[in-house]
Amino acid sequence: MYAVAGGVGTALGCAWLLLLGSRANQMMKFTVHILTTYLAVISVLCFWGEQFFWGVVFAIGAALQFLYIISVIDRLPFTMLVLQKSVKMVWSLPEVMRVAYAFMFVMLLWMGLWSFGAAGVVASSLGESGCWWLLVVLSVSLFWTGAVLCNTVHVIVSGMVFLVLIHGGREASSIPPNSLIKSLQYAVTTSFGSICYGSLFTAAIRTLRWEIRGVRSKIGNNECLLCCVDFLFHLVETLVRFFNKYAYVQIAVYGKSFNHSARDAWELFQSTGVEALVAYDCSGAVLLMGTLMGGLVTGTCTGVWTWFESRDRVSMVGSTAMLMGMVLVGLAMVVVESAVTSIYICYAEDPLLIHRWDAEFFNQMSEMLHQRLQHRSARAREVLTHTRLDGHSA
């Protein structure tokens, strides 16, 4: 059963990489619009199969996904533009694609070993609660291993993309030879400790930040709720200062520790104003939707197979299979995400690097940054005026 999950997840990941150059934009748009429906359908199937807990979980997931899309619908055109340019960058580096395939193969080998343990737990004579606890422990180990491999690819790809932008293009003669090998060697030796450490926190904090931003933008004039959400928002923003995905670019380029890299990257964004652009962009969320979609398809296929083989194990096998699919598809998605983060770091450090690579894209980014900074200034003036009026009325 876990072999089915590994096969489906690998096929989806490979298909994503193969279609990256020609159909990536259409695939991402399709994922954004279909994920809510897919979650709702799975919820109905879970209720029909008397899996009430998972039915509620997927129903809540569908509702949250729908609310999030509604809250960021105006940001999607710019997000798709950034993703399109990132795909263009990655597609010009075929050696990076080979690295992604290699790491997917490594992950598949690890899953082969992991699945023996998971299958043993599922087939054991332990009670259902005991099986669930052991599966949770195994799932955490699988997720962390997958996050470490994803972030290792992140560092390798970020280093290559940054190098290409610094030297003005893939064909530049000034690019050092064997750059990929050196980047790979650096990622799995000197930087590996920082990668493992950062992998524990970045994904959870980033997801929480996206959800809070989506809710915050749609609250309106409810002062009490706005105050509570603002408290959570500032708390998460403080965590983001020390745990963010942009740290991996700094690790790849400058060899800093993870916390030092994360802090420097965030201070760079805030000092240049690019943080307003990064906050507006939803590319990470869109790629996460693709990862979730891959996991859901993998879990569904494996769950249907398990339904005919052993109905009492459907939820156990289906949930762990979904995690396997997410990890494998995530290894494909991280290639594009690395290009996105490198582009923003380069734009913050020296905008002319982006201008030299793609002048039209540079103009579009600069125009959007100007709009976002104006929007923030207007919002700050509005809040200040509102505060003064409240003070006078009191």
Image (spheres, rainbow, N blue to C red):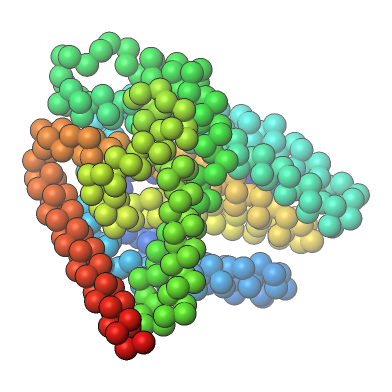
Instruction: Evaluate whether residue 327 shows in this view.
Output: yes
Instruction: Evaluate whether residue 21 shows in this view.
Output: no
Residue 171 lies, with reference to residue 355, above or below; the image says above
Residue 388 lies, with reference to residue 263, above or below; the image says below
**Residue 144 image-quadrant placement:** top right
Quadrant assignment for the C terminus:
bottom left
User: Which residue occupies 22% across, 44% down?
Assistant: 272
Report the side of 119 relative to 210 (left or right): right
Q: Nearer the viewer, residue 156 or 30?
A: 156
The x, y position of residue 335, in whole percent, is: 38, 37
Residue 342 lies, with reference to residue 270, above or below; the image says above
Report the side of 101 relative to 250 (left or right): right
User: Which residue occupies 70% across, 31% down?
Assistant: 113
Report the side of 138 relative to 394 (left or right): right
Q: Nearer the viewer, residue 1 or 283?
A: 283
**Residue 390 image-quadrant placement:** bottom left
